[in-house]
Amino acid sequence: MASITRFRACDHLLNLNIFRSSFKKNGMLNALWFHTTPRRLVVELKMPSLSPTMTSGTIVNWHKKEGDTVNPGDVLCEIQTDKAVMAFETEEEGTLAKIFIGDDSHDVQVGSLIALLAEPGEDWKNATCSDTPKVASEKPKNPPKPNCEVSSSEHQDKRNSKRAMTLGPAVRNLLVRYGLSPIAILGSGPRGLLLKGDVLHHIQKENLKPVPISSAAEPKISSKAIVTEPKKSDLQKGTIKKIQNLTHEQEYQDLELSSMRRTIAKRLTASKTGIPHAYSTINCKVGTVMNLRQKFKNEGIKFSINDIIIKAVATALDLCPEANVIWQGDQLVQPTNVDISVAVATNSGLITPIVTDVLGRGVLEIGDMVRDLAERARGGKLQLHEFQGGSFTISNLGMYGVSEFSAIINPPQCAILAVGGSRLELGDDGKPAMVMSATLSYDGEAISPVAAATFMSTLQRLLESPQSLLLGHRSLPE
């Protein structure tokens, strides 16, 4: 004999229909449990984490609109992370039913619901979700009134008594200049604080004119006190200077910082304060490199000095593996390959795409790869693996006329090379020579000064005799 028992939905089972089937077999009581759940009609699309350090991002723009068909692999929108602008792809299919967070939305937390995707065949116009996010602009219809027995006039008196202590210098100057009282102007700052914009709005609204500055009132002097009077020329000179400062205010424009720039600033601050930076600088004679480049250019083969530097750095790291190290947590490791990160300036900030396996590539291939990565970095089309990682970074500001500078280490890497532009100097033999400065910033805990000096001297020899680099040799020139 068998029996089926149904258990209604409860709090921890949500809306599941749970069944238990009991029956006897060979004198033993057996039970089977099974449940039925409603078919999923919509897919919740949440803010993804597109980088290991991303906690929030900006939805730049949507590629799909409500009602558009979505297939696996389609790009739904572009999201600006703390590293770059990246495409958000989906592996689901259906119809984009609802967009909760639109274009140019800042500080969207990872995991927040941003859209709904209706499954194929479903009515996307009526798709709903129980977890619909609240829009910040929405206000309650009937906001509760505070239960307060203190009258509004008493509140106003308390606010006015505190304003004189919290007025900024710009607000004070405007009040004095136009003969205003802070009590007559309603403040829009925190806790009714009077701001400069409040005063300017009041002046513009009332069409007020500056009050002429009168001479200072004569101080009351005691009969016992002896005070020397200031000269009239000094008073006039001070008055004229004060009028000039008040009538010529400098205008300014607020500049919005992207989340990428803020994250870069936080990471560099943490690196500079938390990593023991040490420095080593060399001056390389690059006349041979420039002549060799010009010779190949005349034959139709083009490459840049930066391409040669990338190849030389990778070869020097291969010859001095003690400098090719990175941190993995608290463990110092040595990568098997030499992957060089190259700093590229974009409108959103600095990003470091990676040239992988530099030792296995020729100079021309390195140049093509760097140009492709830089172009896609400026267009915000880099994939995550193309700028996450790397064992060493090169930052070259020579094309901007910078002769020498030092850079901040990009963790978990342990070193970065700052390359300046070439300049003409007198050599040891008294003849003019083209010289380029390069400064290595390295982690003093991970790389010893001897290892850093060995790497820099090796790099100097490779750059001053670049023929072996073009031939692909992994040895020092004789």
Image (cartoon, helix red, strand yellow):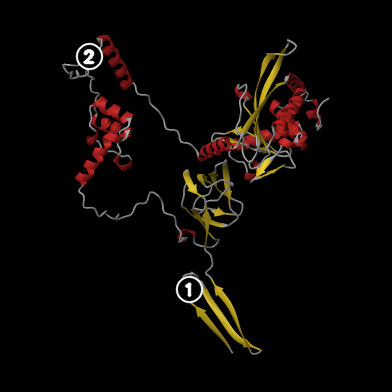
Q: Amino acid at mark 1?
A: Ala
Mark identifier at residue 9: 1
Q: Nearer the viewer, residue 397 or 431?
A: 431
Residue tagged by mark 2?
Answer: 227
Residue 310 visible in the picture: no
Residue 20 visible in the picture: yes
Q: Amino acid at mark 2?
A: Val
Q: Looking at the picture, how far across and down is residue 101, in whole percent? A: 46, 49
Q: Is residue 142 above or below residue 269?
A: below
Q: Nearer the viewer, residue 155 or 380?
A: 155
Q: Quadrant of the C terminus?
A: top right
**Secondary element at tag 2:** loop
Q: Looking at the picture, how far across and down is residue 328, in whole percent? A: 66, 45
Q: Looking at the picture, how far across and down is residue 453, in whole percent? A: 71, 28
User: Splitting the image into 4 quarters, where does residue 174 fall?
Assistant: top left
Earlier-in-chain disc, 1 versus 2:
1
- Nearer the observer: mark 1 or 2; the answer is 2
Q: Residue at x 58, y 47 (%)?
A: 50
Q: Nearer the viewer, residue 368 or 268?
A: 268
- In the displayed structure image, the side of residue 367 where residue 218 appears, left or right: left
Mark identifier at residue 98: none
- In the displayed structure image, the side of residue 234 where residue 224 appears, left or right: left
In the rendered image, the residue lying farthest to the left is 223
